[in-house]
Amino acid sequence: MAEVGISVATKVAEYLVQPIIRHGQYLFCANKFLKNLEDKKKELVSTQDIVLKRVEEARRKTERIEDVVLKWLTEVQTLLEEVEKLEQEVKEKKQLFPSSVSYLEKISSMQGNGGEDKGDDRV
């Protein structure tokens, strides 16, 4: 009879502890994700500033600004606004959404498209 009691107590403990562990893992992953999102956002803003400075320099020299550069700047601005909304929602609701991961991927791809100097001085 004591074995049954121990078995039941063990199962009850598992059912009580597992949700706590899962919640702790979620919080850890969420915090890691938000930190990564913030880091990528800072990198993208930095790249955006560099590109904007180069565009201003080119305009002062009356050089033509490539459409792809203007399009990239527009997309970056739109993405940064969406990320700001996401950050605000996370602060208000204290939870992440499935779409959060797509913003991180978009930021990473935008960083790669505009931030790397591949020998192309197009502005």
Image: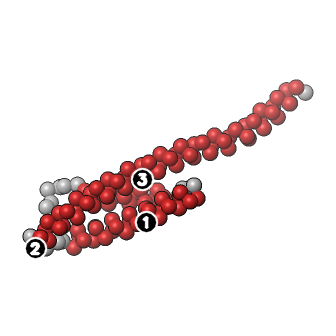
Label 1 and label 2: CA atoms lie apart by: 33 Å
Say which element carries label 1. helix
Q: Earlier in the sequence, mark 3 or mark 2?
A: 3
Query: How many angstroms separate mark 3 from mark 2 (CA)?
Result: 37 Å
Q: Residue 71's image quarter?
A: bottom left
Q: Nearer the viewer, residue 45 or 112?
A: 45
Compute the Cα span from label 3 to label 1: 12 Å
Query: Which label sits in the foreground, 3 or 2?
Result: 2
3 in relation to 24, above or below = above
Q: Is residue 117 above or below residue 55?
A: above
Decide which of tag 3 and tag 1 comes sooner along the chain: 3
Q: How many callouts does the rendering have?
A: 3
Q: Which residue is mark 2?
A: 62
Mark 1 sits on what residue?
82
Task: Identify the secondary structure beneath mark 2.
Answer: loop
Quick check: 28 above or below 77? Answer: above
Q: Residue furthest right?
A: 1
Residue where numbered disc 3 is placed: 37
| Residue 23 placement: quadrant | top right
